[in-house]
Structures are given as C-alpha cells and as structure tokens.
Image: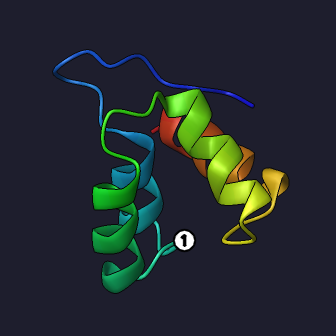
Amino acid sequence: MVGLSNGSEDPELLDILSLSGGLSRNQYNILKKRLDGASENETGIYLVNSGYLTQEQVLLVLENDLFL
C-alpha cells in the first residue's frame, strides 16, 4: 500500500479520496474520526480491509493525484 507523507502541504489520503469521489462526505467524516492518528499506510490498509475501496481504487486515486 502506498502512503503519503504527512507534510503540511500534502493532502491526506482521506482528503484525496473524498475529493476524487472515492468516499462520500459522510464516510469521510466517520473515517476521519475513527482513524485519527493513523498513518497514511494504516488508513489505506483499513479502507481496503473494511471493504470501502479496493487496493486498485486507492492506488489509482493516488497515482492520479501525484501526476496532477
């Protein structure tokens, strides 16, 4: 699973997924609270293992975000 750095200018994984339509606003709000303090890698793994998204969906969103 690919993670993003937590630098102040880098958006978090949940933010990217929400903006790209991968998560609804409600899902985003719930997950933001539930995963508070989790690393980007842990967040990605949680999303896949919980059935929110597939690994391919997460990677596609991250690849698209990196090349914008």
Instruction: Mark yes or no: residue 57 visible.
Output: no
Q: Residues within 10 Å of mark 1 (few under 14, many from 20)?
A: some
Point 71% across, 50% down: residue? 60
Q: Nearer the viewer, residue 52 or 59?
A: 52
Q: Nearer the viewer, residue 16 or 39?
A: 39
Residue furthest left as drawn: 8
Point 38% across, 58% down: residue? 34
Percent coordinates x, y for residue 41 in the rendering = 60, 29
Point 40% across, 63% down: residue? 31
* Residue 36 versus residue 30 in the image, above or below: above
Q: SS of the residue at dot 1?
A: loop
Colour convention of the picture: rainbow
Quadrant occupied by the N terminus: top right
In the image: residue 38, left or right of residue 52: left
Image quadrant where residue 43 sits: top right
Percent coordinates x, y for residue 37 in the rendering = 32, 33
In the image: residue 3, left or right of residue 5: right
Instruction: Mark yes or no: residue 54 visible.
Output: yes
Task: Tell me which amino acid carries mark 1.
Answer: Gly
Image quadrant where residue 38 sits: top left
* Tally of numbered discs: 1
Q: Nearer the viewer, residue 46 or 22?
A: 46
Percent coordinates x, y for residue 48 in the rendering = 75, 56
In the image: residue 60, left or right of residue 22: right
* Residue 31 versus residue 1 in the image, above or below: below
The residue that disc 1 covers is 22
Quadrant occupied by the C terminus: top left
* Residue 22 versus residue 59 in the image, above or below: below
